[in-house]
Amino acid sequence: FPGVRFVTASEAYVICRDKVLGRTFSTQELAQVANQVKPGVMLQVSGDYSLSASDTFYLLNSLVSRYASSGALGEVTLAATLDGPTSQAYGLTAPAGATKIEWSQFSRTSIDVCEFLTSHRSIPNAVWFGSAAVTPEAYLLALANVTPDLVSGSRPPGAVTVVPAKLAAAHWI
């Protein structure tokens, strides 16, 4: 094969390095990331980097939880990629339609999720709002819907609408 060069694993790591790791995202960039999240959650490609659904989950939850805990927004650095959920949320019956979650509950949950992400380095199997649970995909979509308002300087909504969502790649798993 002309032009083909064999490389070692160490060389491949340098050539195919994940350019998103260690990258710091501004609040405006996070708003752009949020605007690309759709109910069929999937990979995002932008310029010289790609974001997995777990990367997007981490970035947006970090922004919202920081706002919830301090009232301030700021840059978020993606230090590592999180693992996916360890299993499906068995017994979880996702609502057929939208579920309204009061902002106070949503913001407290974002802080709890931030702590979970930090200690487990993986996406939770389900995200709990008190006694009600939703899939991580539905929570990610809700984070994405809240982020642009927070970044624009608007007050948080009185309630956040959480709608069902699916990971687009789930049918390959």
Image: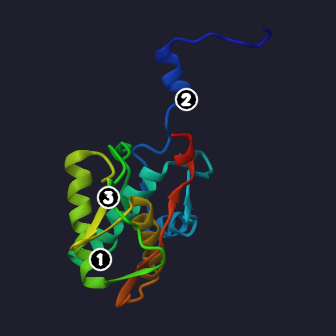
The mark total stands at: 3
Badge 2: how crowded within 10 Å, few (<14), some, or many (20+)? few
SS at mark 3 in the image? loop
Q: Which mark is residue 16?
A: 2
The picture quadrant where one finds residue 150 is bottom left
In this view, the mark in front (2 or 1): 1
Residue under numbered circle 1: 106
Which is more N-terminal, label 3 or label 1? 3
Image coordinates of residue 129 in percent, x first then y, are 26, 73
Which is more N-terminal, label 1 or label 2? 2
Amino acid type, residue under disc 3 in the picture: Gly
Amino acid type, residue under disc 1 in the picture: Phe
SS at mark 2 in the image? loop
Q: Which mark is residue 91?
A: 3
Mark 1–mark 3 distance (CA, rounded to whole Å): 22 Å
Image coordinates of residue 45 in percent, x first then y, are 60, 50
Amino acid type, residue under disc 2 in the picture: Cys
Q: Residue at x 31, y 46 (%)?
A: 122
Q: Nearer the viewer, residue 173 or 10?
A: 173
Image coordinates of residue 97 in percent, x first then y, are 48, 78
Q: Which mark is residue 5?
A: none
Position of residue 71 relative to residue 63, above or below, is below
Q: Residue at x 62, y 50 (%)?
A: 47
Q: Nearer the viewer, residue 96 or 145?
A: 96
